[in-house]
Image: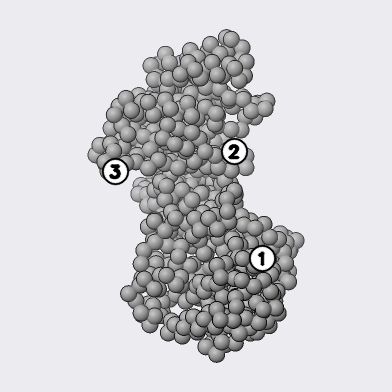
Amino acid sequence: MRTGVATVCLSGTLREKMQACAIAGFDGIELFEQDLITSPLSPEDVRALAADLGLGLDLYQPFRDFDSVPEDLLRENLRRAEAKFRLMSRLGMDTILVCSNVATAQIDDDGLRAEQLARLARLAGEHGVKVAYEALAWGKYVNDYEHAHRLVEMVDHPNLGTCLDSFHILSRDWDTAPIEAFRPEKIFFVQVADAPRLSMDVLSWSRHHRVFPGEGQFDLAKFMAHVVRAGYSGPVSLEVFNDVFRQSDVDRTAVDAMRSLIWLEEQSARRLTVQDGGAPAAHRRRHPMELATLPRVPETTGFDFAEVKADDTAGLETLLGQLGFAFAGRHRTKDVQLWTLGQARVIINEQAPSQAEPAIAALGFDVDSPVLASARAQQLKAPVVPRTVQADEEMFQGVAAPDSTEIFLCQASPDGTAAWTHEFGEGQDAGPTSLYAVIDHVNLAQPWQHFDEAVLFYTSALALEPAPFAEVPSPTGLVRSQVMQTSDRAVRLVLNLAPIVQQGAPDGAPGRKSYQEHIAVAVDDLVAMARAAKERGLEFLPIPANYYEDLDARFSLEPDFLATLRELDLLYDRDGEGEFLHFYTATVGSVFFEVVERRGGYDGYGAANAPVRHAVQYDARQSRGVA
């Protein structure tokens, strides 16, 4: 599949955008007109730069408001078009995007539109240019891709074809199956973009909320399968208008964009295999566009460990001890400690910069084949995390997530044990090995500019499926929360949009995270664990009395049970037949712990209790003078 991206997707100058696209591995670009107009580079400079970078100049865009106009305006539009055709000759480009008219259309007549497009096609032919006609979802008279295609067929000129844009099609819920009946030589270009499902006007949705494939909710694999089965073999290019992407680092965004097309190519190949009835590769229908696939790996089977890094680890060690974790020893060659509770393992890494407060630094996931899983992640543009090992030490495969959290892929074991724990020396007696305790979920706060990137990373590299996102009230506003999980819920990862910290605020100091994250441990008797932790001096997050009055009103709990919840600062939720008990610790640095008990198949996270937690933590930060 030939990959492309529109320069409008990225921040920076035209030169910076082109260089970032080349480094990310794109085959070509769509040159957005404004990027050229505002650039000091001449058309000849752009052409030479593209050649030096190995980038094709695949599409010049956009040419607006051409059709459905009176004759006098048409003549002016043809004059504008010819000027652009001459410019494209200097650039060495041969395809231009022409959008259906929005602003100046006055005559709703397909016969007239076809005649006008025919005149444009003949003029383009004289300059060796192909015109890709696109139906904008908000076009005045032409807003349906099938309508645009009918006009192209009416004209039947070799220099006029159609551009299929997934956003304009899927945002209107048009059926994509008719694409398969299009003549492939009449599909001149294909653009793809994803988007969250939003209730708003389609123009604003398009201009501000498009995202890369895999970061939204459109069924792009289905769209692409129809395109491939139609016989199209040209570029598949990203056209994403997004305010965040255009403010983010150009190199990172280009890599994220490329990752999304790699993921989409794989998903489309799988969809085609299903459509072909799962036939063996040798007997499947052949298509002009060859779709590559990645090493396929099963879902991760669970959390292997969570790692917290800090300069001063005393507070963290005390907190873990009060929770009931046992110190399992120091690593024989590294400045790290291992703490265990049942099969929940927390590593304390002391190799942190000076004065760095505790923060989640790494997560280990159990997978069937760490090498294959790492190879997949690397092909999806994940940076490799180097790890120095000595003889007889586990060879972890590590990659970096978009927020710089290190992700280690560990060899799964049927009994949930970890082979690498033998690298640690003698520690405390961990207690009965039959104790049930596992890492239930981890909550990671994502910088605003990398939130969508993180969703795609965990979807594509770790096969986690995104649940519908939620918004949780807090004293600083709504917190966007996105759950990523395996189908069996063995791994649950919660991504929260980190709040923007004012410049100069204490939490935003260099080397310190400006947001809170937590590790949740599941046990089978939360009340007993809470009592034991209280006896060990654990500081619980204090829950307001008003919460328990509301809880009683909502659920009519047994008085003794409600009294126990109140006594131990426990929170409660119910979902159908399931029940959820949990409590939170105080925060150390940017990390706190949650302990949960799931009863009767409860599958949530106590979302109704999240505003209480946010409010209490906010008060605690304010009392410490932290913004």
Looking at the picture, which amino acid does disc 1 mark? Asp
Using the rendered view, name the quadrant where residue 68 is placed. bottom right
> Sequence order check: which comes first, mark 1 or mark 2?
1
Q: Quadrant of the C terminus?
A: top left
Q: Nearer the viewer, mark 1 or mark 2?
A: 1
When the figure is inspected, residue 373 is found, relative to residue 63, above or below; the finding is above
Q: CA distance from mark 3 to mark 2?
A: 38 Å
Q: Nearer the viewer, residue 299 or 65?
A: 65
The residue at the far left in this view is 354
- The numbered mark at residue 503 is 3
Q: CA distance from mark 1 to mark 3?
A: 47 Å
The residue at the far bottom in this view is 126
Looking at the picture, which amino acid does disc 3 mark? Gln
Whether the residues at callouts 1 and 2 have beta carbons within 8 Å, the answer is no
Residue found at x 64% / y 28%: 575
- The numbered mark at residue 489 is 2
Whether the residues at callouts 1 and 3 have beta carbons within 8 Å, the answer is no
Mark 1 sits on what residue?
144
> Sequence order check: which comes first, mark 3 or mark 2?
2
Q: CA distance from mark 1 to mark 2?
A: 41 Å
Disc 3 element:
loop
Q: Is residue 24 left or right of residue 578?
A: left
Q: Residues within 10 Å of mark 2 (few under 14, many from 20)?
A: some
